[in-house]
Amino acid sequence: MIYSRIVGTGSYLPPRIVTNGDLAGKLETSDAWIQERTGIRQRHIADESQASSDLALEACRRALEAAGLTAADIDLIIVATSTPDYIFPSTACLLQAKLGVKGCAAFDLQAVCSGFVYALATADSLMKNGIYKRALVVGAEVFSRILDWNDRATAVLFGDGAGAVVLAAGDKPGVHASVLHADGSQVGILSVPGNVCGGKIVGSPFLQMHGKEVFKLAVRVLDESAREVAAAAGIRLEDVDWLIPHQANVRILEATAKRLGLPRERLVVTVDHHANTSAASVPLALDEYVRAGKIKPGHKVMLQGVGGGFTWGASLVTM
Ligand code: UT7
């Protein structure tokens, strides 16, 4: 049996930090409101010169270094993003060129805030079939570009960043199981309902959200997918060392851990200093905890995505 296993993690945050206080100077909001409702204190925002592929490049360099590999060792690149550099080619192809390699498979995957988990599950399946041996799985986003900075209900929630893992094929798991779901009928609660046609924006280029509905749905599906993936992996929830749900709102994270009966100490929280970085949030959080020495080899980690689509999913991995 072939399994895929995470052998290196990396992440990158653009240097510019925007605090709640900075936003309160421009919007009718306050540090107290943002912290109380979301747990967010600050977010990183990319310069205009930095695209998703630039953020992804730094995260991949760090993940490759941690794995002791070079880009030439990689035969598959999947980038999860909803904020690609171009309409086409894919951000994965642009990233491949920036990594200075050619020939390996490269494509983008769009599942919004579930994107990284969808990408990990996809890479794992391709590797289990023996097709690929070493993959870069990346979440990279510049959500600051699709926010209406005059809308306090959404502008305060998101940030930019990238996270990456190197997956290697081997005879030990690795990725035990993944579950993926979607409900396209929920398109209206979280979307950027716009497109480009004839050189003009049709619809809206800005993120729109019904926060309360997203909140309720997120807590429900995070609970369900955690139980489903644990059952599929044959691992008891109480044996999970770390829970990394998509970093959307600290209240969603804490509600999920509570419903699952997992102690707060096993819940990974980075949303306070990264805000919601969509597809980048899970690999960013994973890398932070690996580099801090908290997540160690042999630990069982549950990774969970939930977001626009509506999409959700989970993977259970041994590091
Ligand atoms: O990746 C998935 C992405 N999205 C999410 O995970 C978001 C999920 N939802 C949430 O996190 C929460 O619903 C929010 C943080 C977005 C909002 O919290 P809430 O407790 O659901 O607040 P609300 O939307 O019901 O708004 C309460 C009040 C409203 O005022 P009124 O109508 O009570 O007078 C809002 O206008 O708070 C007001 N408000 C704000 N006030 C200060 C909304 N945004 C802000 C703001 N600052 N930034």
Image (cartoon, grey):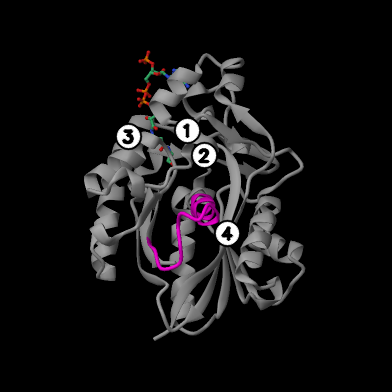
Q: Residue at x 54, y 39 (%)?
A: 274
- Which tag, 1 or 3, sits closer to the chain's start? 1
Question: Over which residues does the magenta segment extend?
Answer: 283-300
Q: Is the Cβ of the residue at disc 1 closer than 8 Å to that at disc 2?
A: yes
- Which tag, 1 or 4, sits closer to the chain's start? 4
- Which one is closest to the eye, mark 4 or mark 2? 4
Mark number, residue 246? none
Ligand 1 shows up in the quarter that is top left
Amino acid type, residue under disc 1 in the picture? Gln
- Which one is closest to the eye, mark 1 or mark 4? 4
- Which residue, given by chain and number where applicable, does mark 1 sit on? 208
Quadrant of the rendering where the N terminus is positioned = bottom left
- Which residue, given by chain and number where applicable, does mark 3 sit on? 213
Q: Within the magenta stretch, is there residue 287?
A: yes
Question: How far apart are labels 3 and 4 at the CA level?
Answer: 30 Å
Identify whether 153 is placed above or below 88.
above
Question: How far apart are labels 3 and 2 at the CA level?
Answer: 16 Å
Tell me if 156 is positioned left or right of 298 in this view: right
Q: Residue at x 48, y 35 (%)?
A: 272
Amino acid type, residue under disc 4 in the picture? Ala
- Which tag, 3 or 4, sits closer to the chain's start? 4
Q: Residue at x 53, y 43 (%)?
A: 277
